[in-house]
């Protein structure tokens, strides 16, 4: 299975934030949307990512005073990404080896989506249920003409 399959099954678009957005506004967006990660864009180009962890680290580093900080001040520039045509097994290996919970999915150099570890697990469980059902039908002799 390819990564595009997971993206096609997700609702909604890609969540991004501008590099010049305030950290407080992004934290508010995370809370309102029930998310914890976004791609960071500048002039329509993906330049990094920001997570709840980045915001927490900024809070600790700045003794709780983050009102003047912008996304660009704390965003991760070392972005983990994969191609939209990558296999889901490759994505799983990438997440494990890089110890990341989110991967940006690129298509011809443009951001196509974001896949979380939760998305990957849901997809894997769905595949297991389909395989399990097919195996039950095979064992019981159902589904043959």
Image (tube, rainbow, N blue to C red):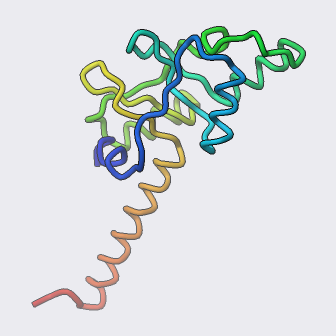
Give coordinates of residue 39: x percent, y percent: 50, 25
Task: Tell me: residue 14, above or below residue 143.
Answer: above
- Residue 98: percent from the left, percent from the top? 54, 27
| Residue at (45% x, 39% y) in the render | 115
Residue extending farthest left: 145
**Looking at the image, is 128 positioned above or below residue 94?**
below
Residue lying furthest right:
63
Q: Is residue 96 left or right of residue 87?
A: right
Rendered-image quadrant of the C terminus: bottom left
Q: Please provide percent x and percent y for residue 20.
A: 58, 11
Q: Name the side, left or right, on which 86 lies relative to 114.
A: left
Most foreground residue, 21 or 89: 21
On screen, residue 24 above or below 96: above
Identify which residue is drawn at 45% across, 41% down.
92
Instruction: From the viewer's side, name the closer residue of 33 and 58.
Output: 33
At 58% from the left edge and 31% from the top edge, which residue is drawn?
A: 99
State which quadrant residue 111 falls in.
top left
Residue 62 lies left or right of residue 28; in this view the side is right
Q: Quadrant of residue 67?
A: top right
In the image, what residue occupies the spot 69% across and 22% down? 54
104 or 35: nearer the viewer: 35
Q: Is residue 132 above or below residue 144?
A: above
């Amino acid at each position: 299975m390819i990564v595009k399959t997971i993206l096609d099954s997700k609702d909604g678009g890609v969540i991004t934030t501008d590099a010049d957005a305030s950290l407080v506004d992004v934290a508010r967006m995370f809370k309102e949307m029930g998310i914890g990660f976004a791609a960071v864009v500048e002039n329509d180009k993906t330049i990094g990512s920001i997570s709840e962890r980045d915001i927490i680290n900024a809070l600790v580093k700045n003794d709780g005073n983050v009102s003047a900080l912008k996304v660009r001040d704390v965003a991760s520039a070392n972005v983990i990404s994969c191609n939209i045509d990558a296999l889901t097994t490759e994505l799983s290996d990438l997440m494990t080896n890089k110890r990341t919970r989110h991967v940006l999915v690129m298509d011809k150099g443009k951001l196509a989506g974001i896949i979380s570890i939760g998305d990957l697990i849901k997809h894997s469980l769905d595949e297991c249920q389909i395989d399990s059902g097919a195996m039950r039908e095979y064992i019981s002799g159902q589904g043959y003409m």
